[in-house]
Image (cartoon, rainbow, N blue to C red):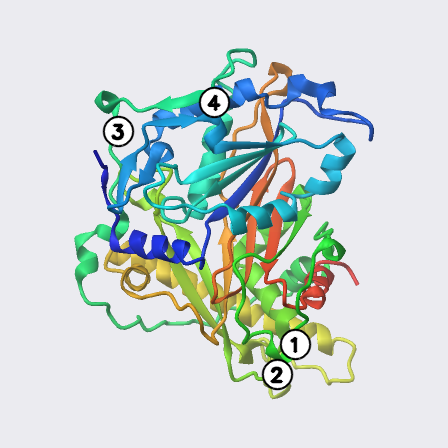
Amino acid sequence: MSFRSLCNVERKVLSQTLEGYRNGVVFGAMYSSTAEEWTDDATLLTYKDSRLSTSMLSRVLKKMISEHVELYATINERLDFAPVNEIKYADVVKEITFDSYKDEVINCRFGAPPYLIRHIFNQTTFQPGSNNVLWKLYVVDETLVIFHGHDVLFDIFSAAAFHKLFLEALNCVSKSGEELTVVFKNDPKSQQKLSRSIFDNAKLHLPAMAADLLNLQTQSFFKSIYLNAVKRPFDYLNSNLHQQPKEIKMRYSDILRTDNNLCGTTIFGTIAPERFDHLSSIAADQNICLRSFICGITMLCLKPMVKNFNASITFVIPINLRSSIEDSSDFGLYYKNVRVECPLSLIDDKVFQGLTIYNGYDSRSIKPKRSDPRYKEQLLEYQFRQITMHVTSIIKQRLRTWERSDFNDDDIKRMRFTLEEKTTNTKLIQVNDVSDFKFSDQDDKNGGFKIRELNVTRSLSPNLFMSLSYTHTESNGLNICIHYPDRYNMESFVECFQSFMEEN
């Protein structure tokens, strides 16, 4: 007995998965119930009480799977979602152990080991009719839990929700108990219903409309957004660049025009909580969002690689729609992609050189001469302001369209009716923001588990030049992953990204 047939979008996503053009999302979280201060020679056996045993994991998964139909769903040969008959612990969990805590720190600093991410994206596949579920866990040293979910049933917000629900279930089960071999057996009498896809809504069968005209209003920044958000330092990107293989070194002039691979180089970094809170308050005061901040820094760091400023860069920004959809599920596809096309003229120095006043509204702010020490600073401030306000304006406009028109939304229609390009000269940069997810903290005195760190990235589709994915926890701040194809020479971009965050 099946749940329902795959809708058009789900079939398209499955087809792209089977053809090797995408392979889901990887979302890792570090779990611990104590503040672990270990020596370099400490082993995993030293702190068993603060880690995730197989017994605990199996009982947590049994609880979660029984409560969420998506976790025991598969796709049969008729391309229907259907329940699996049974799930064994070994079918969905792969345990990885290092010899010492020192090895763990070296391999898992800031996130999942890059070679493990590469293995997941390149080797973990799904086939309809296999009777396998659409997700898997990799547990590293009984502390780092890495969720891999396939795109057909788990968007990036679903992956974040998995860890939120996992943490809640983890703090509900006893630390001691039976180790389960089987974590799920299907009972047709208690079987749940799988939610209908938002892309099956009747309104989406209307012809796609022309894109809305964007009323882009120019808004201004105070100088503090540059001084406090661009120039001042915060902990960022202690990268493992030298550990990453580079198969091909590309010239900068080609970097926006070359096809890329499914999996590439992943670089993780963190922003300390105090610094992140300060940046967030400034962004809020200046009426911009964190997404536009990331887009602004990204474009400025790509500027040395750009040879033709008549082109554009397009950012793809997934927006979580669950809060505005009745009966939505923690899992499934409940999002829309907002595309923000940013003309490269926004970072063309000639535009600034042709101005008399540099902030567009205050006649007292005369642009300094190029020989003036302030010239470069005000050039970057102007370009950063132009980018962030452009991105923020479009995101707000697309959100208003969703609120006003519901499913009669061009972003949803594009995803529903348009085939995603597999080879194109137009490169997309994806910005995956899951920093709004809140994870409950347990009191250390009660011995409850907490999430120490989070990290996330997605597979690279052929038309994706790069992705920037970030998460947030109160204790560790913001974690960012930059993911780009191996064959691109991106060291200069990463160094530039870091330098913009450091005090000169």
Distance in Å between CA atoms under marks 1 and 2: 9 Å
- Residue picked out by circle 2: 307
Residue type, mark 4 in image:
Val
Q: Are marks 1 and 2 in contact (CB under 8 Å)?
A: yes
Residue 189 drawn at (x, y percent)? 22, 21
Q: Quadrant of the N terminus?
A: top left
Please give the name of the residue rendered at 52% of the width and 70% of the height, measured from the top-left corner. 259
Distance in Å between CA atoms under marks 4 and 2: 53 Å
Label 4 SS:
helix
Please give the name of the residue rendered at 63% of the width and 67% of the height, measured from the top-left corner. 487
- Residue picked out by circle 3: 192
Q: Earlier in the sequence, mark 4 or mark 1?
A: 4
Residue 31 drawn at (x, y percent)? 60, 29
Q: Residue furthest bottom?
A: 354
The numbered dot on residue 60 is 4
Left/right placement of residue 453 relative to residue 39 reads left
Q: How many marks?
A: 4
Foreground: 197 or 225?
A: 197
- Residue picked out by circle 1: 252
Q: Earlier in the sequence, mark 3 or mark 1?
A: 3
Please give the name of the residue rendered at 76% of the width and 25% of the height, measured from the top-left corner. 43
Label 2 SS:
loop
